[in-house]
Image (cartoon, grey):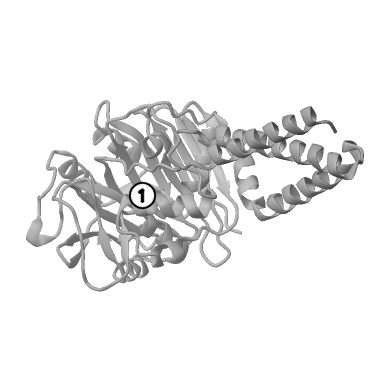
Amino acid sequence: MDKKSTASAAVLLFAGICAVVTGSIIVLPLTPVVRILVWTAGGVLILVSLVRLIASVTHKKASHIAVIPVLGITVFFALFSFSARDKIRSLFSIRKEGRGIYSMTYYGDAMTDEALDAGLMTPEDFSDWIRRKEFYNFPYRYEDPQNGCSAFTSSSDKGGILFGFNFDAPETGVSTLIVYTHPSDGYASMATVPLGQVFGTEGYDPDLPDARLLMLSAPYIINDGINEAGLGITSLQLKIGETHQDNGKPDVTGSCLLKRAILDHCATVEEAVELISHYDVHSHKGVSFHFFICDRTGKAVVVEWFGNEMSVVEADACTNSALAPEHLGEGSVDERLPTLQQTLEESSGILSAAQARKLLNAVSQEGYTNWSSLYDLDRLTLSICLNEEYGNAYCFELSGR
């Protein structure tokens, strides 16, 4: 190989190294797909340049030298595909169920227990943890959605227990994901994820490859859901200032990780409350939240935090105001909670599915209700209506193993 060829090989090598370094700079605003393409281009340039340089030194044909890196690349991608097989299966399971609604089965086990043990106190800690564990250090942004919401539970006129929930937030029309999980050491579950709100509504298109990659974090950012044991849970915003507990227990930020752990490991309200009690809870953005938890025995509670104390109140409905006796009514007070309570009282706590959907409609907030979920805790079904279109429901079913 002459000097000119050697120089061109050196230029290719330099360009390849620059591409790999560029793709590795986390602060650059590159999407995951673009970053992978940059890395791939850099890797190809480096391999081509090395083949040409080795050929010049050994005086062998470049085609013969190329066999070695080609085999290396093949082995690398085979090993990567094997290690990431659950992520790949999860991505290929994504289905568009209708306009603005998707479903995905998350294969493998979410690392919820590890996350809870990590002492994540802020949304930034949470995002960084997901970035490291799920995305091989790709940039990842998580937005804790600000929401209103209503929740209730009642007996069904067909037997069993119903769990209704409205997800109310300013950004209507964003996409919703139903994520299924089947942990090896826990309960199968299905839950909702407000895709546009947690990933940023501007420019988020679930049909693009970049956006679908982000769905791999869905098990960690759920909103409302049920598990195969017949337990249901959601969280609702409380405008009573931030919660920052300091009882010497492991720290957890926001509501999502606790909801994930509860769906994975708890069969009853009592078990869920016990799990929550082992953590110091932190909220952010100037607000707090409370949990609404119900199970197929008909028991339902609201869990709240005031300072270092945790409050547990039995209630069959809640919205965005506190229910703890010492703080009753704190937060956002409106007619939704009285409407829920009155309807449940007048019906003796027994509703048909049609009546439950009518109640969700009655407490919806025009222009704010992104979806209305109606779960059956015995039949393990979900009927969900988007954007206050109560005549158009999408139906899902949770199977066990």
Where is residue 41, by image quadrant? top right
Where is residue 9, by image quadrant? top right
Q: Is residue 327 left or right of residue 57?
A: left
* Residue 153 on image: x %, y %: 31, 51
* Residue 67 on image: x %, y %: 87, 43
> From the image, which quarter does the N terminus lie in?
top right
Q: Is residue 132 above or below residue 386?
A: below
> From the image, which quarter does the C terminus lie in?
bottom right
For label 1, the residue is 163
Q: Is residue 271 left or right of residue 346?
A: right
Front-most of 93 and 190? Answer: 93
Q: Is residue 377 visible?
A: no
* Residue 224 on image: x %, y %: 38, 48
Front-most of 158 and 169? Answer: 169
Q: Is residue 105 above or below residue 188?
A: above
* Residue 227 on image: x %, y %: 47, 57
Residue displayed at 53% across by 48% down = 135
Amino acid at the residue labelled 1 = Phe
Front-most of 186 and 77? Answer: 77
